[in-house]
Image: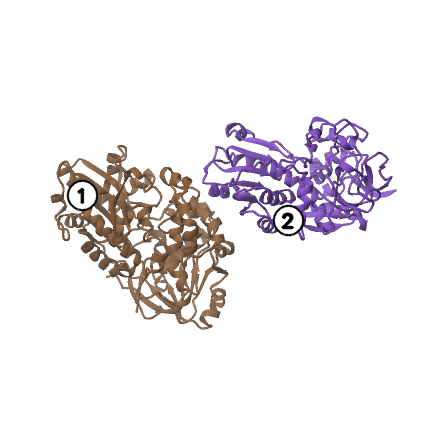
Chain colours: A brown, B purple
Amino acid sequence: MSRPGFVLEVDDRTPPLLVHNGEGFLLERFPLGTRVVYPPEALPPVRDVEEAIQNALLHPLESEPLPELLRPGMRLTIAFDDISLPLPPMKKPDIRQRIIEAVLTMAADAGVDDVELISANALHRRLTPNELRDIVGERVFRSFFPDGKLYNFDAEDAENLTHLGQTRHGEDVEISKRAAESDLLVYVNVNLVAMDGGHKSTSIGLASYKSLKHHHNSHTMIHSRSFMDHKASKMHHSAWRMGEILTEHVKVFQIETTLNNDIFGGPLEFLQKREWEWSIKDQASMLGAKRGLALAPAKARRKIFQDVRANYGLTGIHAGKIEPVHDKTIENVHKQHLVEVQGQSDVAIMGVPFVGPYNVNSVMNPILAACMGLGYYFNSYRGNPIVRKDGAVILYHPVDYEFSQLHHPSYVDFFEEVLSESTDPATIEAKFEKQYAEDPWYIHLYRTSYAYHGVHPFYMWYWISHALDHCGDIVWVGANRKTVERMGFRSASTLQDALEMVSHSVGRSPSITYLHNPPHLLADVR
Amino acid sequence: MMLALEMYRSPAKFLAAKAVGSRIPGVLTGPAAPLRLVTINEPKADRDGWARIRPILSGICGSDLGMVTGHTKLYFSALVSMPFVPGHEIVGELLEDCEDLPKGTRVVMDSVLTCAARGVEPCESCVAGRTNRCDRITVGHVAPGLQTGFCQDTGGGWGNVMVAHRSQLYAVPDGLSDERAVLTEPLAGAVHTALRAKVEPGQSVLVSGAGAVGLFATLALRELTQAGRITVVAKHPKQRELAKAFGASDVVAPDEVFRGVRRATGAFRLKPELNAKEFLLGGVDIAVDAVGSKDSIDTVLRVTKAGGRVVLAGMPSTGADLSPVWFRELELTGTYASSREEPNDRPAFETALEIAAKAPLDGVVGARYPLYRWREALDHAQSAGRLGTVKVAFDVRAS
């Protein structure tokens, strides 16, 4: 039986606790009384994945079974979540591969021969052929990719976009033409955290900038509290409204999966255990990894982390109509991630790990590090933020000045040009967003290379707008001072120094909460 | 007799400077400097139109430093007469009447030694008022020398006394301080550069370099043209600050030029093989190189849009890759000194004096040295950017 998450109060017997710190980790002694929120242990996985898939497809929620929706001569489109999920990537076979193979088998049995597969990457970078292969598997890749029937969505291909209309709030719904004109759109989702899935899959994953700008903006995001609670997130409200329009025009068969917290295996297994339960072997692994990573050249260190493949077990799969499917999904996600926390604290501490949704097989640049800590981790709550209004957030990450010119070309410019002018999300949105969104070079790189869209760094910055608005102080421990300053934050050498720096706003004896993730958790702050 | 710094011919020092100057910069202003502080005869002003001047302040220019450190191309060796007293950026006082200018008048000097000064029939350029293009700079009754400060007969600003011809002189308005007046010559060069750049309203301009040449070019471009975005490439904090004050729309670091220009112009950025230097398809309409180094010229050629104009304002020292000039059909324009007849139908010096009076130039002359501290002065000038100084000058009266 897996144990639920819990909140530990640090006392004098508590050992040093592990903190993720980019491409490495460290052991930190927290002040007495610090609350440490531990994620639940991995839920037991579904025993027979194939059977679960068949069951979901044949007994969907509020929908005909999939075989009944398939017929000869129809246009079938299968869209799937891109490389940004799950994190870290999962061991093969990817759950998307297994589902897509099952769907394709049923389609073949029904005589469907007009099938296309689309990576729903919205404004994310295109996936390389190898990355597509990793997701859909060798057989599907070989059958569809060479003929151009397996491809990345291109949000800048105006000829292949369809405007479906506007929501009651005047939000444009513009998505992939192929998806819009399909007789059936099957969406294959991997729901790692509560933010994913639902109408966000189709109406964001297959949408253009024209559509996305209605909810990916500073105003909407500052009022999404939190992203991990779709009922309290303005961004999700907008996506849901768009979903209503989309499903009026397109028949969507949504397949959502949930994964457990079984992330780190092998020599990194100690990362998902509680420190006082580390065996001799775990301690040896930890020491070896810590020393080895400290000594390894940056390239080797990056490769070690980029090669991490998670053991994820499937905890559930549901298919059918989007809303009921997503309700079931959220139930499962909550089972795995929710940890009840009583009240907010003055200070929240978070360790930012080596990977986020936007740097798979790449570099976590300063903006992505900020987004991971202040966007994703800060928003890993339901009810109230883990830190009180005007409290302090302390983050761990080196925040090196390092950018991938291949994947994040507009990020460099954003960092150098935009952030040097202002760090206020609304200001930079008004002054710079359009320029970056329409820059022909970024568009060219997004369409033909493997670059995130020119506007993407803005979205990352909007993503942290709630944290910027909520927190009085943001300090990074052990971070590059210059890069952190450019983003409007401060850097401290040690946790003690960081606490000293924030003492003017939270006092000398603040209440502290440390979110001990990954593995993922969702703080249910009462 | 007078005290002066004299540049003399010394092949050994020249070779020493070439050999170790880049590794041991100290030798360039130390033992390898072909310069000496001497007591020599005053230059004579015994022909019509000539008069003696006592320099008050005399600036140290990049071309002076190039001569001292051996960076100047041998091309120019035929245009100077050794030994000579350097110094062509001056504000001084007439020691005697000079035609309509009475003794005691404060003057600045257009240093080009034209046909008028040399007492020869005006060449085609001089007739047209393009005095900086004079073809007779090595003949006439004055020793060869493209300018005062490179000529054996005239002396220069780095000495107690020098001579100049009336055609070279402009009276300094009473309200203009010596510190501003000494900047007139480089400002006139900047005026010439700005006008030679032929900037159309709204065009984007890149100025590579934020030493005196680059900063003044920025100032003149803002003052005399309707340029749109002016991007300045600056290394040091003080340079960035001044570039902004002089009218730059934005300032980028040298390693940020391609990124910055690409962003500003929406150009496409290409990277050739084998670590060859990148370039843009698209870019600025006009680029001004105010450095003269290979790297800077290479850069401006690569960030100028097809059909654009590249203006060389810095004295070029080494060869650049001209592929972009051919492939992008660039217009390559040189700009040297300044002219009596500029495209705005005025002498550059008149315009420069006006700019000197109203521009935010306080503190631009950041250091003044007496002649006998010449090594320190040259060291300071060599590192001016890093030290936050735009212009170092000799305070000749204190020498």
What residue sits 30% from the left and 58% below the top? A234
- Name which quarter of the figure residue A29 lies in: bottom left
Quadrant (top left, top right, bottom left, bottom right) of the N terminus of chain A = bottom left
Is B340 placed above or below A314 here?
above
Q: Which disc is residue B386 wearing?
A: 2
Q: Position of residue B279 (x, y in %)?
A: 50, 35
How many residues crowd mark 2 within 10 Å: few (<14), some (14–19), many (20+)? some
Residue B297 seen: yes
Q: Is residue A81 toward the left or the right of residue B344 in the image?
A: left
Q: Which residue is more in the foreground, A159 or B193?
A: B193
Label 2: which secondary element:
loop
Q: Which disc is residue A184 wearing?
A: 1
Quadrant (top left, top right, bottom left, bottom right) of the C terminus of chain A = bottom left
Label 1: which secondary element:
strand
Q: Position of residue A503 (x, y in %)?
A: 47, 69
Is B229 placed above or below B312 here?
below
Circle 2 chain: B
